[in-house]
Amino acid sequence: MDIVLYGALGPEGQERRLAYVLLKQALVDVYGLAELPAVARCPGGKPWFPQYPQIHFNLSHTAGAAVCALHDQAVGVDVERLRPPPVHLARGMAAEPFFREWTAREAAVKRRGGSALALRGPFPPEPLCRPVENFLPGCVVAVCPSEPAPIRAVRLELGGGGTEG
């Protein structure tokens, strides 16, 4: 199965709601589920569907943008708006290289169900984590699957249809 990645730009302050709108739309499109199933959380905070444990998903949002990844195996996703990186974390890196590395690391931690505290410690890059190029303007997006799989990216336009890439 392809990893299905939905993303959209939206109004600031509505990103969390937007992430769930993307999840609901992805579930309709991929699995034909008309209603959002009940969501539970693993001990590390990773969300899952107790009623549909075979459906793995992950959500992320940043200022004015949100993404949702679906797969039949554990998957992590992260999105960050391009901006000046935090000086204490960037170690002199420019914004785009820093956020490429950061989103890949965060997606890997989220795939495993870990907490954001794990991002502080060093760990080697995960070979399966990869950026999704030119998906959301002004943002860096990374997906980290459990196994190699193609990514089918769908960008939704609020108030309209989506565009696949």
Image (cartoon, rainbow, N blue to C red):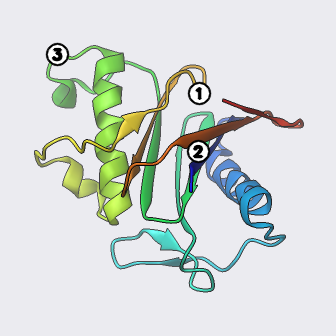
Give the Cα distance between marks 1 and 3: 26 Å
Q: Nearer the viewer, mark 3 or mark 2?
A: 2
Can you say which quadrant of the picture contains the C terminus?
top right
Q: Residues within 10 Å of mark 1 (few under 14, many from 20)?
A: some
- Residue 99 against residue 7 in the figure, above or below: above
The residue that appears at 27% across and 27% down in the rendered structure is: 86
Q: Evaluate if marks 1 and 2 touch, with contact meaning CB atoms under 8 Å apart.
A: yes
Can you say which quadrant of the picture contains the N terminus?
bottom right
Q: Quickly name the residue at label 2.
A: 67
Which percent across, then down, holds residue 92?
16, 16
For the residue marked with disc 1, what is the amino acid?
Phe
Q: Quickly name the residue at label 3.
A: 92
Q: Quickly name the residue at label 1.
A: 135
The quarter of the displayed image where residue 82 is located = top left
For the residue marked with disc 2, what is the amino acid?
Val
11 to the left or right of 15: right
State which tag comes first along the sequence, 3 or 2: 2
Circle 3 SS class: loop
Which percent across, then down, holds residue 113?
34, 66
Give the Cα distance between marks 1 and 2: 10 Å
Which percent across, then down, holds residue 71?
54, 59
Q: Nearer the viewer, mark 1 or mark 3?
A: 1
| Closer-to-camera residue (86/32) | 32
Q: Residues within 10 Å of mark 3 (few under 14, many from 20)?
A: few
Circle 2 SS class: strand
For the residue marked with disc 3, what is the amino acid?
Gly
